[in-house]
Amino acid sequence: SSIKTEKSGYVLRFDGGARGNPGPAGAGYVLYDPDGVEIFAGWKFLGKKTNNFAEYTSLIEGLKKAKQLGVVGTAEGDSKLVISQMTGAWKVKHPDMAVLKKKADEVRGGWNFKWIPREDNSQADKMANIAMDERTDGESSPQPTK
């Protein structure tokens, strides 16, 4: 069996939200190729959850998709909590967060993690809002441009 090499240089942007915290929650994630072209976007309705649950879930779902596609790179999000816990800068104190962190660690592979300002995360935010508005799960994969 041949070893499948992962393609690197990809960017995963993730965002989660909850209306009410806890309230109706959604996860959104968008994957970009090394040229910055959007190759995949997904959203998932989570039911009544907290904002942090939604943020972690959006990262986990995005990483799972990236794994399916065999790509690695940098995961970017505007959640200081999730990014700081994934990089090891902050300890995980809350038991619910520990469960989510463990799930994220199981799918993190060779990914790096980077905090970005909220205004740079509008596409993933849009996906999370679709999930909350429509209370659905879904995905869109634009046709490859090459």
Image: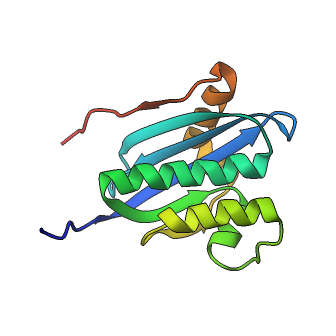
Image position of 42 with respect to 12: above or below: above
> Relative to the observer, which residue lies in front, 106 or 43?
106
Image position of 102 with respect to 47: above or below: below
> Relative to the observer, which residue lies in front, 102 or 41?
102
* Rendered-image quadrant of the C terminus: top left
Question: Looking at the image, which residue is at 76% across and 77% down?
Answer: 91
- Residue 62: % across, % down: 49, 50
Relative side of 93 to 11, left or right: right
Image position of 23 with respect to 52: above or below: above
- Residue 22: % across, % down: 85, 40
Question: Looking at the image, which residue is at 12% across and 69% down?
Answer: 2
- Residue 103: % across, % down: 59, 61
* Rendered-image quadrant of the N terminus: bottom left
- Residue 17: % across, % down: 73, 41
Relative side of 33 to 106, left or right: left
Image position of 50 with respect to 79: above or below: above
| Quadrant position of residue 113 | bottom right
- Label tally: 0
Question: Looking at the image, which residue is at 48% across and 63% down?
Answer: 107
User: How is the structure coloured here?
Assistant: rainbow
Extreme left residue here?
Answer: 1
| Quadrant position of residue 24 | top right
Question: Looking at the image, which residue is at 45% across and 32% down?
Answer: 139
> Relative to the observer, which residue lies in front, 135 or 37?
135
| Quadrant position of residue 70 | bottom left
